[in-house]
Amino acid sequence: MHNISQLSKQQVGLRLPRYLVDEIDELSRQFSINKTDIITEAISSYIKEQKALLFYDDFDKSCKELKSAIDTKSDLRSLDDLIDELEDSDS
């Protein structure tokens, strides 16, 4: 959730390709939606998608590291041992 100061709007200048402006204008007319709201939603969706991709990439990397550590270090007895081993290998 965002606080009030984070929800305040700030004017930003940007240049968009003409075809995107035409599509935004068409959506704005068709759905009676403010162009700012369309652009804000598009940027917000893009940022959420990129964050999700980063999260899943990091998660996938962590799973592969965990599997590798388990496969090569059968003498580890606990999760703490495994974490210590992974931290030591990063140093």
Image (spheres, helix red, strand yellow):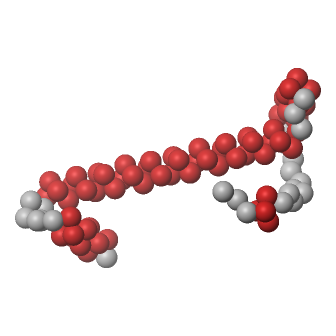
* Residue 15 in view in this figure: yes
The C terminus: image quadrant: bottom left
> In the image, what residue occupies the spot 86% across and 26% down?
31
- Near-viewer residue (21 or 17): 21
Q: Residue furthest top?
A: 30
Seen in the picture, residue 58 relative to 82 is either above or below; the reply is above
Residue 5 in the image: state x and y as whole percent.
79, 65
Seen in the picture, residue 51 relative to 81 is either above or below; the reply is above
Quadrant of the image occupied by residue 90: bottom left
> In the image, what residue occupies the spot 7% across and 64% down?
75
- Near-viewer residue (36 or 24): 36
Seen in the picture, residue 75 relative to 44 is either above or below; the reply is below
> In the image, what residue occupies the spot 53% across and 47% down?
52
In screen coordinates, is 31 left or right of 60? right
* Residue 22 in view in this figure: no
Residue 85 in the image: state x and y as whole percent.
21, 70
- Near-viewer residue (27 or 69): 27
> In the image, what residue occupies the spot 64% across and 49% down?
47
Residue 87 in the image: state x and y as whole percent.
29, 72
In screen coordinates, is 2 left or right of 16? left
In screen coordinates, is 69 left or right of 22? left
